[in-house]
Amino acid sequence: MKLFTGLMFCSLVLGVSSQWYSFLGEAAQGAWDMFRAYSDMREANYKDSDKYFHARGNYDAAQRGPGGAWAAKVISDARENSGHGVEDSKADQAANEWGRSGKDPNHFRPPGLPDKY
C-alpha cells in the first residue's frame, strides 16, 4: 500500500511539473510570436496596419496553448497601459482580444499590405 501511495504521489508531482514545463515553453514561444509581429509591424511601416499586427501577434501566441495566450495577454496589457491615447488603446485591445480568441487576424488587414506579412 505504501508503495502504491508513493507511486501515485510521484506520478502526480511529475504530471504537474510537466504541465508547468509545457506552459513555460508555450509562454516563451508566445512571447516570440508577439515580438515577431511587433518587428514585422515596424518593418512594414504601413498605414493603418497596427490593429492587424496586434491581432496577428495575439492569434499566433494563443495558438501555442494556454501559456502562449497568457504571454500575449500580459504583453498586450503592459503595452496598452503604457500611457498612449485612450481611444487608440481601446481599439488595440479589441484587436488583441480578437486575435487571442482565435478569430482571423486578417479581419484587420489593411488593403495593399504586402503578402509577406
Image (cartoon, helix red, strand yellow):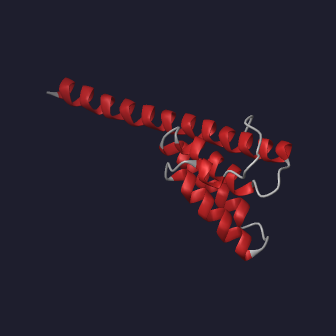
Q: Depth check: 46 or 55 in front?
A: 46
Give the image location of residue 56, x and y in percent.
Answer: 64, 46
Looking at the image, which residue is at 78% across and 71% down? 83
Q: Is residue 10 left or right of residue 98?
A: left
Q: What is the number of callouts on the image?
A: 0
Please say if 111 is above or below 5. Answer: below
Q: Depth check: 62 or 74 in front?
A: 62
Residue 8, quarter of the rendered image = top left
Looking at the image, which residue is at 36% across and 32% down? 15
Q: Is residue 43 left or right of residue 76?
A: right
Looking at the image, which residue is at 68% across and 52% down? 52
Residue sitting at the far left: 1
Q: Quadrant of the C terminus?
A: top right
Q: Depth check: 43 or 1 in front?
A: 43
Q: Quadrant of the N terminus?
A: top left
Please say if 10 is above or below 86. Answer: above
Give the image location of residue 103, x and y in percent.
Answer: 51, 50
Residue sitting at the far bottom: 86
Give the image location of residue 69, x and y in percent.
Answer: 54, 48
Looking at the image, which residue is at 75% across and 53% down? 49
Give the image location of residue 4, x and y in percent.
Answer: 19, 26
